Amino acid sequence: MSIIPRYGRCGGAAKVALGVFLVMALCAATAAARPVRLLVFGDSLVAGYGLPHEDGFEARLEDALRADGRDVVILDGGVSGDTSAGGRARIDWSLSDKPDVAIVELGANDGLRGSDPAAMQANLTAILDALAAAHVPTLLTGMLAPPNLGAAYGAQFKAVFARLSQRPGLFYDPFFLAGVAATPALNQADGLHPNAEGVKLIVARLKPLIEKLLDEANT
């Protein structure tokens, strides 16, 4: 005896369930196909001060990631002259762009102004708290104080980033300008901002860590 399926209420419910499943699967596939939105949040060092747009950090990073097959869009959060206080004041506005992941690079201008390291820590903590509350995996890249401000200030300044690096789940790089700072051939005439070659080196050094950050957006 053959069994012939009967389509009553249960059959209709099954069709509805199947339809819901297909819609959810389509939404998931669409989300997976969407480029990862990477917020680069910082000061002139990421804003490309003194450089053509195509030679700035954000443009170079996007090119390098895409060359490796990464489907990524950079959200421009670089403001020349910005301090940690300025970043704290605008982080909510930047989050309105719905980033998937973020890089935070701030502190250079705090150091140039001799700002209180405790105030800088409070500002950076507020920024990282806002990103964490929005479930945005984040890379914090640190900064060092100018040596002319003295060893004691430099140690306090550096300790801020060391403490912040202990936050659970935070990706961390100790010094954004590592390998570039104080090298004339890699900096512009002001001795503060990387030239095009300096930016290339920074991008190449940070790219493996940034790719781990991007992988976090896909988990």
Image (cartoon, rainbow, N blue to C red):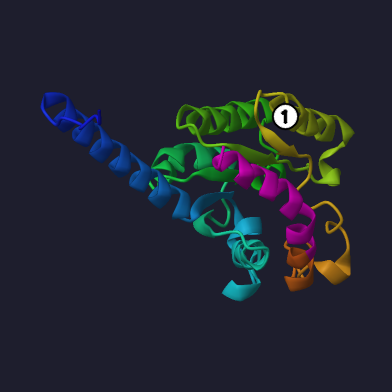
Q: Is residue 88 above or below residue 39?
A: above
Determine the main secondary structure of the stretch shown in magenta.
Answer: helix
32 vs 125, left or right, is: left
Residue 175's x, y, as percent? 78, 45
Q: Residue furthest front?
A: 1
Q: Is residue 9 magenta?
A: no
Label 1 sits on a secondary structure element that is: loop
> To which quarter of the image does residue 120 belong?
top right
Pick the residue in front: 167 or 137: 137
Residue at 54% x, 37% y: name it.
Answer: 85
Residue 214's x, y, as percent? 61, 46
The quarter in which the C terminus is drawn is: top right
Residue at 31% x, 37% y: name it.
Answer: 21
Residue at 52% x, 49% y: name it.
Answer: 39
Residue at 88% x, 34% y: name it.
Answer: 151
Badge 1 crowding class, 10 Å Cα cut-off, few under 14, some 14 to 19, many 20 or more, is some
**Residue placed under numbered mark 1 in the picture:** 165
Residue 201's x, y, as percent? 80, 63
Q: Which residues are magenta?
A: 201-219
Is residue 70 in view from this perspective? yes
189 vs 76, left or right, is: right
Q: Label 1 sits on what residue type?
A: Ser
